[in-house]
Image: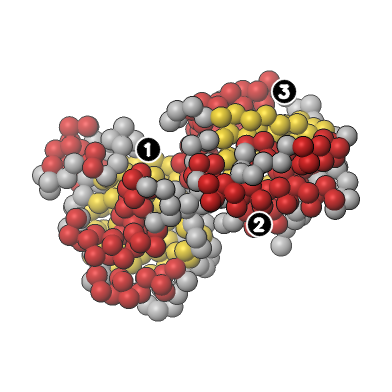
Amino acid sequence: MLTEHFFSFYYLKMNKFLTPEAIAQCITALIARNKLWAGKRVLVSFIVNKTAGCFTNKKKAARYGRLFEQELLTAVKSGAPECTASVSYKILSTQYSGHAGELVLGLVAECVALGDGGFESVIVTCGGDGTSLEVQEALYKEAQTDPQKKNAVMNKITLLRLPLGTGNDGTDGHSIPELFDILKSQLVYVNAPALKVYPEKMPSEAEIVDSALKYGKKREKYCNVEYKAPWYGFNIVSIGLDAYVVYLSNLFKRKMPGEFYHIAVPISALVFNKDFKPGNAKIEFFDDNDDKFSEITGGITLFAFGASGHRMYGGGQKVLPDNNNICLTPKMNIFKIIKESKGYAKGLHFEAGLSQAFSAKKVRISYDMPILLQNDGEVAMLSPAHFPLIIEKTAPCVRVLSKVL
C-alpha cells in the first residue's frame, strides 16, 4: 500500500533538512487523496533545482523540511483514503541553465506517447522563480509547435509551482502552508494565459546596442544579453521602478544568500531616476477585439501588466489588488516613492490616487530612453530600439489548479 510506504519513509528516512525525496513523498500523498484525480493513474514529475536556496540555505532547508515532514505525517494519519487508481513519481534534477526547459520537452513527448489511457501527468517545480518561469515558458512554447503537444499541455499535464523561492511570483500559494491548503481543497483545472512581450518591429542586435550606448548604457551590466525577445511572463510583467527593484534584488542574491526585496525598494527609489533618466512614454490600450480604447502620455515610474487582476508579487505585494490587470504610476519624485512604498505593498495605491488602473488584453508602449523590464523575476534591459513594445495576453494554454470558491 502507498500508505505503508509513506510511514516507512517517515520513520526510517526522516531528514533534518529539506530533500527532493521529502517533497515528492508529501506532494504525492496529497495528490493521491484529492478527488480531482479520483480513478486516474497519475504520473508526478518533480523538476528540482538543487542549487536553490530552499535546499542550500540551512535555515530555510530546516524550516521547509519540518513543514513537509509534518504535512506528510498529517496526511497519512488523517485516514483520508487514496482515491487515485495509482500514483507514482520521479525526480528530475537540473544540471545547468536551460535544463528545466529541456526536461519539460521530454515530459510532453512522454505524455503524447501515453495517449488517452486514463493517465494524468503533473509537473511540479521545486526551486526558485527562475525554475518556475523556465518550466512554464517551455510548456507554452511546446504547445505551439504541434496539435498533439498542445492537447497534452492543455488537457493532460497539470503544472504545480511550489513556493520555494525568494519571490514566489505566480506560484501556487505564497507559502508552503498555503500550498498544502490548496492541495487539500476542492480543485478544478484552469488553462492560464501567458504574457508575451516583444518589439513591434524586431531590431537588429547592432541597433539595440547602438541605441543603448547613445545613453551610456551597457546591457550586460543589468541582464544576460542572450535573454532576447520575445519574453514571456505568467504572473506580472513590469517596466520601470519595479523592474529596477528586481534587478537590485537579483544583484544582492548573487553576492550573498537571503531575501533582499525590502532592502532593494528604498535603495531603488533613491537611485532609479539617476541610473535610468526619465523619458516620455505613450501607452495605447487595446481590448479583446484589438480595438484601441485609450491612450496615456507622459513620464512613468511604474507600469505593471498582469495575466489577470488580483495579482501579487512574492511576499504579498499587492500591485494588482482588484479586477483590473494593469497598474500605471506616473512620474513621481523619490521622496514620495519612499513614503508611499508601504501603500503599494498593501494594495492601497489606486484608492490613494497614486496609480491608475486599466483592464486590457494588449498595450503598445512607445518610449525614448533605456529602461528595465522584468517578467516574473527575470530582467531585460530595453533600449529605445525595442520600442514600440507590445505586451499582450495570449490565449489560455498551460493547465494549472484553482480552488473551488
Q: Residues within 10 Å of mark 2 (few under 14, many from 20)?
A: few
| Secondary structure state at the residue bearing disc 3 | helix
Q: Is residue 76 left or right of residue 133?
A: right
Residue 337 % position (x, y):
30, 71
Residue highlighted by disc 1: 230
Q: Where 378 sits versus 277, above or below?
A: above
Which residue is drawn at the image coordinates 28% and 62% (left, top)? 267
| Picture colour scheme | secondary structure
In-front residue for pair 215/286: 215
Residue highlighted by disc 3: 114
Residue 396 % position (x, y):
57, 44
| Secondary structure state at the residue bearing disc 1 | loop
- The single residue placed furthest to the top in the displayed view is 113
- The amino acid type, in three-letter code, at marker 2 is Pro
In-front residue for pair 153/76: 76
- The amino acid type, in three-letter code, at marker 1 is Pro
Query: Do the residues under discs 1 and 3 have CB atoms within 8 angstroms?
Result: no
Residue highlighted by disc 2: 177
